[in-house]
Image (cartoon, grey):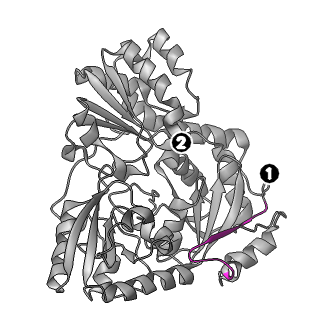
C-alpha cells in the first residue's frame, strides 16, 4: 500500500480535499484501500489555550461517568484493595470494574462469562482475578473469536452454566431482553490525546467546513468531547443511524450523508471506516489514528468492488440451487432474515439448502459440490471483502434480493445491515421486523 511520507501543507491538502477522482486507486484490486499521510502541526492557528482545552474536555468526559458512579455503593468505589487491583490495568482503558462488581453482587451471580475481542484478551486473566477476589463468582473466559457486537455469545455462556455475561469492546447491538441470561456491555472507552486531535483538524480544515465525525464505541467519549470544541470552528455533525449512537459506525452499518464536505474517522484500522466510505463514495474521507497520531486521507476503489459484486450477482442468477448459510457465531445469523431469504429462493423456483456455520471459508464450501451459489447471513463484509476468494458466488442478503429481482441494484452500495431504517427485509432490524428490544450498556445505570 503506497503512502506519501512527506508532510503536506494546508494548500495541498485543500486541493485534494475537494477532489476525489480515484487517481490513488487506479492500480488497486477490488476494494483495495490506499491512504496518504497529511501534514500535522502541534500549534495550529486559532487554537485555544491548551489548559482550557484540556479542562473542558476532561469535564465533558467525567460528567457522563459521574452519572453512573453515583449509583454504585461507596463500599465498592472506596475499597482501597479494589482500587489497587484496578490500577494494575491500563489507566487509559475503562473496563468498568466497579460497575461490574456492583452488577454481579446485585444479581447474586454465581458464574460469569467474560467475552473479549482479540485485542483485549490479554487483560482477561487480570480482570477474572479481580472479579473472583471481590465477588463470590466463578469466572469463565470465552476464547472464541469475536469479530464485532454481532458475536455476543450468550448461547455458549448459558451452555457452560453461567448466569451472567460481560461483553467487552462493543456496543449493545444485541438487546439484553433477547439474551438468555443477565448481561452487561462494557464499551472499554479509551482515553486519547483529545487536544491533539482537535488541533489537527483545526490546522487541516478551513473554518466552517462541513465535517462529519465518526468513530467506534471505544472512542465515543473522546469524539463527543472533541465535537463540543470543534463545533465552534466547523459546521460539525455526529451522524447517526439507529440503533447506533451518534457518530458510531460498524463495518456493515453507517449513515448515508447528504450535506457534508469531508468525513473524519477517529480510530485505528480501516474496517469501520471503509463502511462509511462505501456508503458515501462522493465524500472525501480522512482518518486520525489516536495511537500514532497520524492524520491521513483515505481511498477505496468503489468501482472495482461494485464490479466484482455485480459479476457475482450475475453468475448467481443462473444458479438452480442455493446454499443458505446461517452464521452461528454469536448472534451473527438471523432467523427472520433466514426465513425471508428462503421464501424468496423457493418462490423463484430454485432449491435451497440451509447450512449452519460459525466460520465460513472457501475450503469448507468446496465440500458442497451440488450447491451452485451461496448466500451468507453472517457478515456482509465477508462477501464484499473476500468474495473473490470463493470459487462460487457468495452473496449478501441484499445481493440475493437483487439477483432474484426483488430489489434494484443501487448506484450507492448500501451499508445499512443493522439499521432500523434499512432498505428491505433482508436485514435483521428492518422496520417490518418483529425484533425489538432494550439495551443495558456500560453507560446506563
Q: Residues within 10 Å of mark 2 (few under 14, many from 20)?
A: few
The mark that comes first in sequence, 1 or 2, is 1
Between the residue at mark 1 and the residue at mark 2, the CA separation in whole angstroms equals 33 Å
Judge whether 419 appears above or below 86 on screen: below
Is 11 on the left-hand or right-hand side of 149?
A: right
Look at the image and say whether residue 37 sits in the magenta stretch.
yes
Q: Which mark is residue 425?
A: none
| Whether residue 136 can be seen here | yes
Judge whether 123 appears above or below 307 on screen: above
Magenta portion: prevailing SS class: loop
The magenta span reads 26-39
Q: Nearer the viewer, residue 339 or 422?
A: 339
Q: Nearer the viewer, mark 1 or mark 2?
A: 2
Q: List x then y, in percent, for residue 58.
A: 57, 37
Question: Is the Cβ of the residue at disc 1 closer than 8 Å to that at disc 2?
Answer: no
Q: List x then y, in percent, for residue 307.
A: 50, 85
All told, the count of numbered labels is: 2
Q: Residue at x 65, y 82 (%)?
A: 22
Q: Residue at x 43, y 46 (%)?
A: 145
Q: Nearer the viewer, residue 36 or 214?
A: 36
Q: Nearer the viewer, residue 50 or 336?
A: 336
Q: List x then y, in percent, for residue 261.
A: 59, 75
Q: Quadrant of the N terminus?
A: bottom right
| Whether residue 182 can be seen here | no
Per the image, the residue denoted by label 1 is 43
Indicate the secondary structure of the residue bearing disc 1. loop
Per the image, the residue denoted by label 2 is 119
Q: Quadrant of the C terminus?
A: top left
Amino acid at each position: 500500500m503506497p503512502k506519501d511520507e512527506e508532510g503536506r501543507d494546508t494548500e495541498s491538502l485543500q486541493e485534494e480535499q475537494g477532489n476525489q477522482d480515484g487517481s490513488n486507486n487506479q492500480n488497486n484490486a477490488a476494494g483495495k484501500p490506499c491512504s496518504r499521510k497529511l501534514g500535522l502541526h502541534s500549534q495550529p492557528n486559532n487554537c485555544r489555550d491548551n489548559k482550557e482545552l484540556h479542562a473542558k474536555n476532561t469535564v465533558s468526559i467525567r460528567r457522563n461517568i459521574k452519572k453512573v458512579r453515583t449509583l454504585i455503593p461507596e463500599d465498592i468505589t472506596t475499597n482501597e484493595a479494589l482500587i489497587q487491583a484496578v490500577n494494575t490495568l491500563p489507566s487509559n482503558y475503562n473496563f468498568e470494574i466497579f460497575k461490574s462488581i456492583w452488577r454481579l453482587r446485585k444479581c447474586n451471580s454465581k458464574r460469569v462469562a467474560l467475552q473479549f475481542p482479540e485485542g483485549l484478551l490479554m487483560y482477561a486473566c487480570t480482570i477474572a482475578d479481580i472479579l473472583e477476589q471481590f465477588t463470590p463468582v466463578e469466572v469463565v473466559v470465552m476464547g472464541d473469536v469475536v469479530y464485532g457486537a454481532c458475536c455476543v455469545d450468550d448461547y455458549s455462556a448459558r451452555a457452560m452454566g453461567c448466569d451472567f455475561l460481560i461483553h467487552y469492546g462493543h456496543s449493545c447491538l444485541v438487546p439484553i431482553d433477547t439474551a438468555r441470561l443477565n448481561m452487561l456491555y462494557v464499551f472499554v472507552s479509551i482515553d486519547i490525546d483529545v487536544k491533539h486531535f482537535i488541533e489537527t483538524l483545526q490546522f487541516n480544515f478551513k473554518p466552517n467546513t462541513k465535517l462529519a465525525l465518526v468513530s467506534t464505541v471505544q472512542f465515543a467519549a473522546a469524539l463527543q468531547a472533541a465535537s463540543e470544541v470543534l463545533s465552534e470552528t466547523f459546521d460539525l455533525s455526529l451522524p447517526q443511524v439507529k440503533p447506533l449512537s451518534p457518530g458510531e459506525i460498524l463495518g456493515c452499518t453507517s449513515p448515508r450523508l447528504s450535506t457534508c464536505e469531508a468525513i473524519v474517522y477517529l480510530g485505528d484500522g480501516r474496517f469501520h471506516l471503509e463502511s462509511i466510505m462505501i456508503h458515501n463514495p462522493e465524500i472525501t474521507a480522512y482518518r486520525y489514528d489516536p495511537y500514532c497520531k497520524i492524520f491521513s486521507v483515505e481511498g477505496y476503489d468503489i468501482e472495482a468492488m461494485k464490479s466484482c459484486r455485480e459479476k457475482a450477482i450475475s453468475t448467481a442468477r443462473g444458479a438452480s440451487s442455493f446454499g443458505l448459510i446461517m452464521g452461528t457465531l454469536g448472534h451473527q445469523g438471523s432467523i427472520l432474515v433466514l426465513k425471508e431469504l428462503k421464501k424468496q429462493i423457493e418462490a423463484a423456483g430454485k432449491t435451497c439448502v440451509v447450512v449452519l456455520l460459525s466460520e465460513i471459508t472457501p475450503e469448507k464450501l468446496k465440500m458442497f459440490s451440488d450447491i451452485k451459489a451461496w448466500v451468507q447471513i453472517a457478515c456482509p463484509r465477508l462477501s464484499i471483502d473476500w468474495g473473490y476468494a470463493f470459487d462460487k458466488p457468495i452473496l449478501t442478503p441484499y445481493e440475493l434480493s437483487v439477483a432474484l429481482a426483488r430489489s434494484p441494484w443501487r448506484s450507492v452500495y448500501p451499508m445499512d445491515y443493522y439499521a432500523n431504517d434499512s432498505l428491505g427485509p433482508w436485514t435483521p432490524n428492518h422496520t417490518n421486523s418483529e425484533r425489538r428490544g432494550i439495551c443495558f450498556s456500560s453507560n446506563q445505570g
